[in-house]
Each structure stands twice: as structure tokens, then as C-alpha cells.
Image: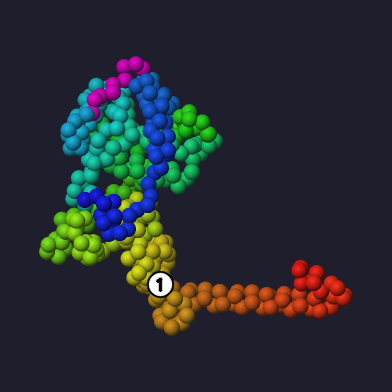
Amino acid sequence: MDKGVLATALGSPAPFGQSQFAFMRGNAFEAKVKADGGAELLRLLYERLGGGAPAPAGDVATPDLSAAGPEGRAARTALALREATAAGGWALLDHPMLALEVAGSPAYLEPDAVVVHPDGRWTVVEIKSFPMIDASADASKVGAAARQAAVYVLALERVAAVTEGAEVGHRVLLVCPKDFSNLPTASVVDVRKQRAVTRRQLTRLTRVEDIAAALPEGTTFDPACPPEELDAAVAAVPPAYAPECLAACELAFHCRAKSRAEGAVEALGRSVRGELGGLTTVAGVLAAAAGKEGDPADPTVAALRRAAALRAEALESAAVLRAGAREAASAAGAGAPEGMEGAAACR
């Protein structure tokens, strides 16, 4: 099921996506990095993660990974990884296909590249078009790249577990444009923390079969269904909306509208939701702050009432200051010499 098509059928299309210019620029940069059999990419990797192995030369293997469908490509990638590891040399796999089980169903992933070292280590390579200025890139973008690479590492570990002599490196190579040029530079990113978080999150996901079993009989997500029926079908799966969804899910605008209509505090962000404890609606939060609801002994309620009191005090002080300023201006205008009243008023 394409979530973008489903969102459009629900009347909440996702008006976002990478611009055509950014897409073309990213493809051009990746092609530059991988030109001449990946010579520049391998040079950058050897400089930062070479580890004592002989430098890559003209004998770097670049196996053909083409096959029918994602399952075929994933199988071909696994075979190429095993063959490259057994050969004991350098190998560059361009856009390999990896498989990872997510909530009981296979998900197919395509990293930019995976490099096999002569010692059997496998390194994920992520190529991004955002710049590294003075050897440093935007922290949020690097974090997103690290989380993405951690998923690839998890998928590779499944293949490495059945490949003799293979080991997946927990440090990935991030390749970006240098400063304001189109020349590639690279940085090593340790993704052990992101890998551990992702693995824990994957174990907590509800299996697709369990979700389907809990749905009412006859539920369908066919975009051709009437909007009311489709909306009811989507509502049967409880959403877990947060603002972060806007950057990754085509259904985020639909879920946000529902979340706002219900007054759910999740619409304000996960951090806010965590601070509010048992208060789950915006109306409940406002009522607790106003002293109309909630247990005064609850630390969250007490903090809200204290914040409301401070806000009221600040607004009252501001009103007094504005009133004083108006009185001073009026007095200055009344006491001005004849003919200067207009000038005082203009000031």
C-alpha cells in the first residue's frame, strides 16, 4: 500500500519532498564520488578506515548486483558479499539491496555503497549532498544520516552472521561536498548508539499480523473506497503522531489533523508529551493550569499552575508599564509650550 496514494485519497496529500534541483544535485555528486570505479570513494575510505591493509588498487572488485525484483537483488547482494569476503581483497558494492525484518515483514533497503575490506570487514558508505564546512556538517543532518546508516548495519549483520570471516564495521563513512565546492570529503561516524536504539525499537514493534488481526472484519485500505469508509478504516489503526512524522511519513498531515481535532498533546511533540505526565489533552492541560482540574499535589499540575501565575504576573506588569508610558506621554504633551503639542504627539 502506497501511503502517499492513501493520503491523497483521504484528502490530506503530503506537500513535501525533495526538490528536483536537489535530487539532480545529489545524483550528480554521487556520480562524481563513484566515478572511475569508485577510486575517489575508496581513497577517502582508505585514508580514514584503511586499518593497515594494502591500499586499494586497480584490482578492486565491483560485482554486478542486478537481479529480478528486490528479493532477487537482496539474494544477489548476499552472494556478492560472501564471494568478496572469501576472495580476501577490496570490493565495492554499488547500491546493494539488503533485507531486514520489520514487524514481521521484510523491508528492503538500498545503501549508497558497501565496501568489503581485505580483512573481511564491511563498511557502509553514505553519500550526502549537504556540505562539510571546516570538516564539520550540520549536526541534525549528520544525526539523521547516522540513524539511516545504523539500519543498514543491522541488515548487514544478518548476512555477516552466516558468512565466515565477515564482520560489519560500526563506523560508517559519510561523504559530503567539501566547504562550498563540489569536491568530496569524508568523515567517520560511529553508529553504535543508533544501532542499539534501532534494534530495541524494532523488537518493540507490533507485528503486522497482530495489527491485521485486531482490525474489524472486511477492513480495506483501497484508495478507491468512498472517503468516509477509507477514513474509518485508517482510524481503526491507532496513530502515534508526532511532529517528527512530517519529515518521513506521507500520512503525517492526516494524522496531525486528527490529533489536533482530538486536542492530543502529542501534536506538540514527544518531549512535551513526556513532561505532561497523565495529562493527555490540551484542554486538560489548560484546565489544570487554570486550577479547574487536576490534583494540586501532582508535580505536573503544580508546575503548570506556577507557570500560569508567572505568565499572569508578567502580563499584568506589562500592562502597568504600558499604562504608565501612555500617562507620561499625555503629560508631556499637556505640558509642552504652545505650538509643540503636535510634535509631542508625533513622538
Q: Label 1's element? A: helix
Does residue 103 sit above or below 159 in this rendering? below
Which residue: 19% across, 56% down? Answer: 224
Farthest top residue?
58
The quadrant holding residue 120 is: top left
User: Would residue 189 be visible to someone looking at this image?
Assistant: no
Q: Main secondary structure of the magenta part?
A: loop
Magenta residue span: 57-65
Does residue 252 sit above or below 56 in this rendering? below
Q: Is residue 285 left or right of residue 327?
A: left
Which residue: 64% across, 74% down? Answer: 318
User: Would residue 79 be visible to someone looking at this image?
Assistant: yes
Residue 9 position within the rendered picture, expressed as x and y whole percent measured from the top left: 26, 56
Does residue 326 sit above or below 77 in this rendering? below
Q: Is residue 1 magenta?
A: no
Image quadrant occupied by the C terminus? bottom right
Farthest left residue?
217
Residue 99 position within the rendered picture, expressed as x and y whole percent measured from the top left: 22, 40
Please name the residue that numbered disc 1 is placed on.
282
In front: 207, or 231? 231
Q: Amino acid at mark 1?
A: Val
Farthest bottom residue?
292
In front: 104, or 121? 104
Residue 188 position within the rendered picture, expressed as x and y whole percent measured from the top left: 42, 35
Q: Is residue 58 magenta?
A: yes
Colour approach in the figure = rainbow
The quadrant holding residue 146 is: top left
Which residue: 32% across, 55% down? Answer: 13
